[in-house]
Each structure stands twice: as C-alpha cells, then as structure tokens.
Amino acid sequence: MKYNCRNCGSVFEGDDFTLECPKCDSTEFDIYGEKADKQKPESSIEEKVEKGDKTVNISVSDGASNSGKTVFIRPEDLNKDANPTVNIPPSSKSGSEDFQNHKEGKQIPKKPDQTTPITDSNKSNVKQLAKKKSSPFTIIIIIGLILILGAAGLWYFSQSDSGKVDDKKEVLNTETEVKVRIEENEGAFFIKGSLIEGNQEKDLQAKDILAVYRANDRREVNFNKTTGQIYFCQDMEGLTAFALEISEYNGPEAITNGIELSLFGKLPAPEAQCRHRLESRFINISFTSSCEMVVEITDPHDYGDESFDVSISGKEGEFIKEKFKWNVEAMMGQAVDVWVKQPSFTPVAYSQNDTRVIPNCGNDVDWDAIKGKLAIAAQKYGANPDDRVASQEVQELSMNSLPGKPIFIVDGKELSGFSALSTKFRIDHMNEGKTFELSSQPQLINKRYWKIEYNSK
C-alpha cells in the first residue's frame, strides 16, 4: 500500500502498521491517490521568499496569527516541491532560539514530538489514521475475548447439573438391584452380595446389613457385622435361605440362595445365642369327659423358667399365659386353632396349623345317632375307597366326636388314626383292587374314642 506524506510530499510504501513518513518522520500522510482536504487553516498566511533565482510560495502556520512574519529558508533546505508546508510549534516565534540557530546554520536540537492540533482540515485524516492504527489490535482483542468467554462457558456447562450429573444424584434416581448369597468357607457360612446402581456394581458390606432372618419363618439370626459370618443353632441345620434388611435399600426383599447349613458335628458358636425352640410336634391336644380341652407340651427338653402363652383362636387371637386347660362344653362341634408362643420366638401352631373340632361331651349327647351315621359312612367308604364324600364323613365323625384318636382294624392289623386307614385303603385298592366291608358296628370305648373293624375282599 502506498502513502503520500503531507509534510514532505514524498510517496512511500507502507502497510496498516505504518505510523510515520520514513523521510521526514511526519505522522501526517494520506493513502496515495485519495483527495485530501486542502483547506488552509484560518490562522495560516502566505509569504514569498526570494533567494537567488528562486521564488517560492510557502505557507506558514503556528496555530495563531502570523501576519507580518518573515521566514528565511536556505536553498539547500528546499526540495523540489513548489509549495512546502512548514509547521511551527505554538511556542516558536520570530527571533526565537530555534529560528536564530536555523538562520546561522547551526544544528537545531531535536525536541520531543508534540501533538499536532486537530483542525477541520485534518480531522478526517486523524480519524482514518486512528482507525488504521487500532483496527488489527481491536480484532485480536475481540477474538481473544471470544475464546476466553467460550472456554469459560464450556467449563461452567461441564460443572453444571445440565452438563454433568453428580454421582450421588445418579444413585438416588437409579433403581438399585441387590444380589445376595450364602457361601461356605472352612466350615463357616458367610453372607456375600453386591449392589448394582445403574452401570456401577460394588460389593455389599456387612456393616450395611441391618438384620438377617430365616426366609420361611422370619426367625432372626445373629451375624458378624465385619465378616458377614452367620451364626445358627442345631435346629436350623438343613436347606435354608435367608432374607436381609439392607441400609438405604427400599427395593424388593433381598433373599439369598438356599444352602445346606451344617455345624459339621461341632457345637454352635457362642454368638448364635442358641435357645431350645418349641416345635409343633411337641404340642398335643386332648379332651376329657368333663368337656375340658387340655394343651400339653410333650417336649422332653427342660425349658427351665420359661413360660408359654396359649391361644385357641389362631395366631392373631388372644394369648393367655400358662393356660393349658380350657372348658369347651359350650363349643362342642366347633373348630379350635391352637397356637403356643415361646418368649422371644414367633408362635408355633399345633400340628402345623391343623385345627381340631371340639368333640361331643356331657350327658346330653345322642351317641346312638352318632354311631348309626358313622356305620353308614364307614360301609360306603370301604366299598369304594375313591368315594371322597364318604371318606370325609368317616374322618369327621371318628375324629371330632370324641377326644381320642379312633382305632381301625383291617384284617386283624390295628391302625391308629384316620390317616393310617386312608393310606391303607388307597394303596390296596389301587394296586390290588381291594375293597373293604365292616365286620361289626363301630364301638364307643369309654366315651374316649371309636373302634371300627374291616375285612378286605
């Protein structure tokens, strides 16, 4: 790009970063070819200088009135331009030290650059020069600001909830899956498992387990909060699964695999805190002729000072402490649901929650009528062991009308209870096609139980 110096008139090459004329160091120049504003300032004057055979018109401006001034210029100081412009600083006057030195041909000391006053004639050039000076730097600064703001925006977005989900929030909003199992190691059994949260899986820690129960009856067992080892008693040996309560987990119940527990012939660990637990097979019910129902604990184990509570109206019924005898005269023919509660354990049902019907008792019972109904039902059942209606009637009359179990004799062999009779009939009838007939009428023995005899055919 070419420029035209307004001070010395020279034309020179430059670029957007050119700040002064390389010949006269002037900062006043135009783009070559552009028409510059040539108006003269109001304070400028024109004078003629004669020297030798040259007559030169010069314009002198010092920013103030210069009328009556004479300027002397040496011919060698003049260039070929017809109308050079000389700018005199406002502080320079006719007869000043600088002018005298110039007149006498002495070296004029170079003074610091002074700001050229902005007039109407050079205002547009000043604006254009300022624009040329600042434009590249402004672009660089703007680009830098854009890059900085963009980087800051990316950083903020990466730290915000919309750009990055906090791990804790993800756990809370993601369904947690639990996998648990029991493992045997050197004769001991341990709880193992894992928690799966989203795509993350971590080991289940024993300290996060709140409680462990046997799955089938919710019986709580002790365990080690550090190692996860479970402690159990002899009555828990065999196939067992456990249910776990886990801290901060509200999903489906966590149940382990079934595993064969064994003490391997050793005593339970002291941490098991084993106590003898009552089993349903040791609960017995009997009825007296005076219309009393007696609940007995037949377990040979010595329970010491432990007491038992009894309910005859189900697991949710009223439990009465140490009440083993009940007057049931007003309840003849009704079913009773007997449960026994041992301290610190869940209640245990008689005969695995089997119910009993209170038999007939007292002097107002028509035993002959009962005997006749039983004889008809027994004859039908023997003739067709597949007759379920007759089978059920024999069971109810023989079992529920008297307190004791009925005795059945088949071909001379004694069977105790209706279950033994029904098994005999079913097997012989299915394998050999046998049927049975009564050999005599049912017998009432001491108003305690029935005796019924059959012969096969």
Image (cartoon, rainbow, N blue to C red):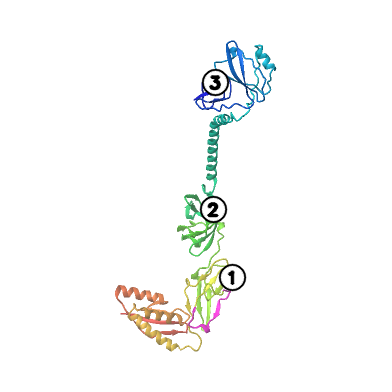
Please state which of residues 444 and 224 is positioned toward the viewer in this rendering. 224
Q: Earlier in the sequence, mark 1 or mark 3?
A: 3
Q: Secondary structure at mark 1?
A: loop
**Inter-mark Cα distance, 2 to 3:** 95 Å
- Residue 9 got which mark? 3
Point out the frontmost of discs 1 and 2. 2
Is disc 1 surrounded by few (<14), some (14 to 19) or many (20+) residues within 10 Å? few
Q: Earlier in the sequence, mark 1 or mark 2?
A: 2
> Can I make out residue 188 in this image?
no
In the rendered structure, find residue 206 and report the number of the disc placed on it.
2
Please state which amino acid type lies under the numbered disc 3. Gly
User: In the current view of this chain or complex, which residue is farthest to the top?
Assistant: 52
The residue segment tinted magenta is 319-335
Taking the image as drawn, is residue 55 in sight? Answer: yes
Residue drawn at point x = 31 percent, y = 77 percent:
434
Across and down, in percent, residue 132 comes to 54, 30
- The numbered dot on residue 307 is 1
Image-quadrant location for residue 389: bottom left
Examine the rendered structure and indicate whether residue 452 appears above or below residue 232.
below
Q: Amino acid at mark 2?
A: Ala
- Pinpoint residue 395: horizontal percent, then vertical percent: 41, 79
Q: CA distance from mark 1 to mark 3?
A: 127 Å
Lateral position of residue 317 relative to residue 372, left or right:
right
| Mark 2 neighbour class, 10 Å CA radius: few under 14, some 14 to 19, many 20 or more | some
